[in-house]
Amino acid sequence: METSPRRGWDLNQEAFDELLAWLNPDRERAGRKYEDIRQRLIRIFMHRGCLTAEDLADKTINKVARKVSEIKVYYVGDPALYFCGVARNVYAEYYKGLVELPVVTEIIPAPVPDDLDESELEHECLERCLGEMKPKDQELLLEYYREEGGAKIEQHQDTARRLGITVNALRIIICRLRASFKKCMRKCVEAESN
Amino acid sequence: MSLQNGRTDSIKRYLLGELSQHEQEEIEQLLMSDDELYQELLFAEDELIDEYIFDKLPEEDRSKFKQRFLRVPELRQSVGFTAALRKHAQQTAPRTIAEKPAPRTPSLFDWLKKFFMQPAVAVAFAAVLLGVIGINVWLLNQNSNLKKKVAQLEAGQSVPQSTDLQQRLASAQSRNEQLSADLLRNQELLAEASRKLELAQQQQTTPTPRSGAGVLAIALTPGVVRESSQWTKFSLTTDKKTVSFRLDLAANDYANYEAALQTLEGQQKLTKKGLKVSKANLVLFDVPASMLPAGDYRIVLSGANSTGPANEISSYYFRVLK
């Protein structure tokens, strides 16, 4: 749970505290709400194709935090929606910045790399992250990705039947396992790269 | 989390960048406040990545996916992790490609086993056993009584025996023999029934080994690169006796194929000639698992026509993990 401003921010502790208090009077809940808003903003920027989604999310929060003493007086409703409006302005600035780059005479799409081959580092992290999972979860996740085509569908049906759940419920379990696996991978790759 | 409602389609279109600006802003507004929709977005993201990795996306969507997902570092990383997971899943514990055994006709023993394992039959069988035991006790008792009567009759032989008494004695002896035979038969029946029951119980706890177990099938694609990060890697468990390699052929240009298994130091471990090629252009090369301790290996595949010498076609690299 976040209880202090992120590193590199020009936001002081007082403004950050005020922001949290606006999100929720309970500091622990406010911290969770803050992190939730940040994650959603990152996703929105990512799906708008921004290459610096995290920075833009922090910039959005920063802008809201600076104005929070005024906002809280008149704004009624879910604070998350206010962030969304500010995020649109931040995106507009970002896009304008891209277009106005002096050297750019024509926007040329960056080549999309095709190879997704894992590096040695990723391979090590993969082994480690799978190793940290419960054996049952690890086997379930690997089983889910093992087969292809028709065999894959049959495999999922067999697995669901064996566990006594529906295929849809299995997909939700896999979604959670995958999310936890990817989180571990990100942490590991980041830690090993530094 | 509902995955079947109409919003799923909108989310997919949002992720592929197919929505108008207005629709996009509307979805984003909802994503900030609607927990369920946000979860659906995360789910749809993973589903799209899976479809891309498993090559299930239509060409048009694939192109949009690449533009949207592979350019953004975080999304690209997510795609990479999923691809690595899939590769790992298929390499470390690949399925045995051996065809499923045809369903065999159940034997008489299977039928008996199945029959005796039915709960109703088991109860009835137990009742029959109890009945047989009861009959045996009764027969033993009758036998004993008859023996006593015979003894009494023999004791009274000082009196001149009448024809009637002789007949009664003969009849009693005959009945005695009959009862002894019945007793013996019932004891045999009881022993046989107990043996069958015990056998059926043993079979229930000891599954029949599956056909195809012991063979690990590994598909290999040719690689000229000696970069180990691109090799197929797998582990061998003690239950695997044979590794059945499927060597991917670009084209089936030769009449005969031979494969040589070597260590990377060039030590020849096994050579096989006259290998079969499947319809899918795969050369099947079986190697005893005992010949593959942990290490790096190369399989050199050569092809020859009846008239010419063998030509080296390609090499396949792999690593056996501990």
Image (cartoon, rainbow, N blue to C red):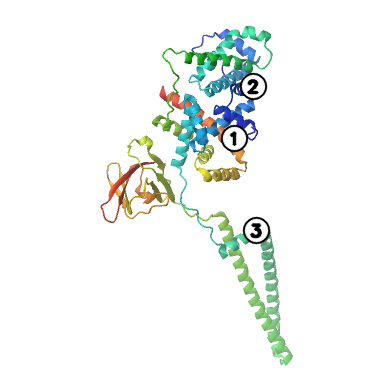
Q: Please state which of residues B200 and A156 is positioned toward the viewer in this rendering.
A: A156
Residue that protrudes farthest toward the left in the picture: B309
Q: Which residue is mark 1?
A: A172
Q: Are marks 3 and 2 on the same chain?
A: yes
Report x, y in % for residue B160.
71, 92
Along the viewing direction, whichever of A34 and B178 lies nearer the viewer: A34
Cα distance in 3D space between marks 3 and 2? 56 Å
Under circle 3, the secondary element is loop
| Quarter assignment of residue A73 | top right
User: Which x, y percent locates residue B262?
Assistant: 30, 46
Please tell me whether mark 2 or mark 1 is closer to you in this view.
2
Quarter of the rendering containing residue A39: top right
Instruction: Please report the residue visible at 48 percent of the width from the left and 20 percent of the height from the top.
Output: A51
Q: Quadrant of the N terminus of chain B?
A: top right
Q: Amino acid at mark 3?
A: Gln
Task: Tell me if mark 3 has few (under 14), some (14-19) or many (20+) residues whose alpha carbon lies within 10 angstroms of its own.
Answer: few
Q: Which residue is mark 2?
A: B33
Check the residue under mark 3 and report the chain it is in: B
Amino acid type, mark 2: Ser
- Classify B129 as above or below B157: above
Establish whether labels 3 and 1 are both on one chain: no
Measured Cα–Cα span from mark 3 to mark 1: 37 Å
Relative depth, front residue between B153 and B242: B242
Q: Position of residue B267 (x, y in %)?
A: 27, 45
Residue A32's place in the image compared with B56, above or below, is above
SS for tag 2?
helix
Can residue A116 be seen here? The reply is yes
Tag 1: amino acid = Ile
Mark toward the viewer: 3 or 1: 1
The residue that disc 3 covers is B118
